[in-house]
Image (cartoon, rainbow, N blue to C red):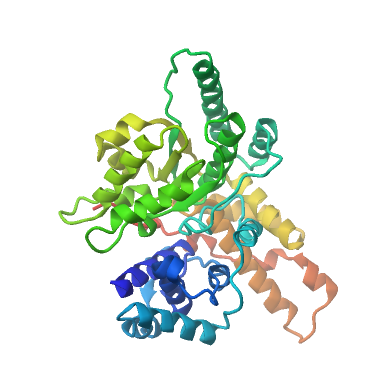
Amino acid sequence: MIRDQARDEAIAIAKAYSHSQVELRHVLWGLVRALGADAPAEVPAAAVRALLEPSGSSFEPPTVSEAAEHALGDVTSFDSATAKIIDLARQLGVGGPAPDAASTRQQTKATADHDIDSKTDSDASADDAPHPDDTTESVLAELDALIGLGAVKQEVRRLIAVQRLNTERRTAGLPEVNPSHHVVFTGAPGTGKTTVARLIGRLYGTIGVVSKGHLVEATRADLVAGYVGQTALKVKEIVSRAIGGVLFIDEAYSLASDEAVDFGREAIATLVQSMEENRRDLAVIVAGYPDEMRHFIDSNPGLRSRFTHYIAFPDYSAPELVEIFEGFAATAKVGLGAGVKEQLAGLFTSVLEVGNFGNARFVRSVFEGAYANMATRALADDRIDRAEMDEMAAADLPVEVSQLANPAHRIGFQPR
């Protein structure tokens, strides 16, 4: 029913944003997602999405607050779900005319960060359109400009070379070699998988592998319904939006549950069928942890035969993490004072030893924590000097950064 679907969507988006608790804003998002095109037009999805910022730093599954449970408890039908959306929107200050598709895409692009997977991974409504002036060379230059990822960049270039040669051979009437353009990404969260998927989509568009080159992102919550007969419809709806570009499924292994009753298997079967039906104008990129992705690919023979390209995303090194931190600071126009970079290098080195720390996603949480300390310091005397506004000091950095990296928990769903 709608309530259960909205609850699943609310939990999924809270997890995607690393929030520790499902709140009313997450419930509002879940209800809007559950109703889809039937959601009230006066509550624009882009405005609801803005309520989810900023991302948190929790590595634990989110708990559902009492207020959220109470709000969901009132949802018993389509009409009550619509009424609850309007009521929550009023409480949370959301309203106004619904934005057009172009402005929604523009806002999504403006808020995305190229080093982090977490912001838009669970938002299948945020379709990324290719740039009108894209060329293969210009998109590859963007790829080269990303921090680190040396081996990934090489593999992407090899992939594009294979696709370009096969395109020319197909035009010349020659047989293609390894013609599949579907890809498996393996690696931890925060290693740039979403960003690279977006670039591959645009590259595919420039060389004619697909007709458009846009990206549609999806997770289990976008593909699997909670009742019989609806999962296939959800998958087909997502695929229809991705035709002409790339469908990117993060944490794809969550579809391959070993439980006796689970609609994830239906989602996989429908996906395989859709890949075959649209093999000339659809690319699918699936992503997740290496072991879990092997389990996913082995769960269906159709996946094994279609996913023949694999790209591994390594964790960032300490110097690269420092560079990512500098990028956050530059975007925010915050200077880094004496000793900040040196202290960061030590902190990130200690976190790397702990492992499973979230990579660039974790760096963002460190930056936001340091900025909060900077703000507290600046307001200690009830006035803010210009220097306090512009520069972050070494003393602002969290001291026990290693405690924020939890080696015992991974982010997202795990196969049982």
Q: Is residue 266 visible?
A: yes
Q: Quadrant of residue 347?
A: bottom right
> Residue placed farthest to the left in the image?
260
> Residue placed farthest to the right in the image?
386
How many numbered marks have been drawn onto this rendered protein structure?
Answer: 0
Q: Is residue 408 above or below residue 42?
A: above
| Percent of width and height locating residue 162 | 51, 22
- For the point 55% across and 73% down, the residue is 51
- For the point 36% across and 60% down, the residue is 221
- For the point 28% across and 71% down, the residue is 1
Q: Quadrant of residue 406?
A: bottom left
Residue sitting nearer the eye, 386 or 245? 245
Residue sitting nearer the eye, 292 or 228? 228
Q: Is residue 121 above or below residue 14?
A: above
Q: Is residue 291 above or below residue 413?
A: above
Q: Is residue 99 left or right of residue 241?
A: right
- For the point 53% across and 18% down, the residue is 171
Residue sitting nearer the eye, 117 or 166? 166
| Percent of width and height locating residue 269 | 27, 44
| Percent of width and height locating residue 338 | 77, 59
Q: Is residue 165 above or below residue 414?
A: above
Residue sitting nearer the eye, 81 or 284? 81
Q: Is residue 65 visible?
A: no
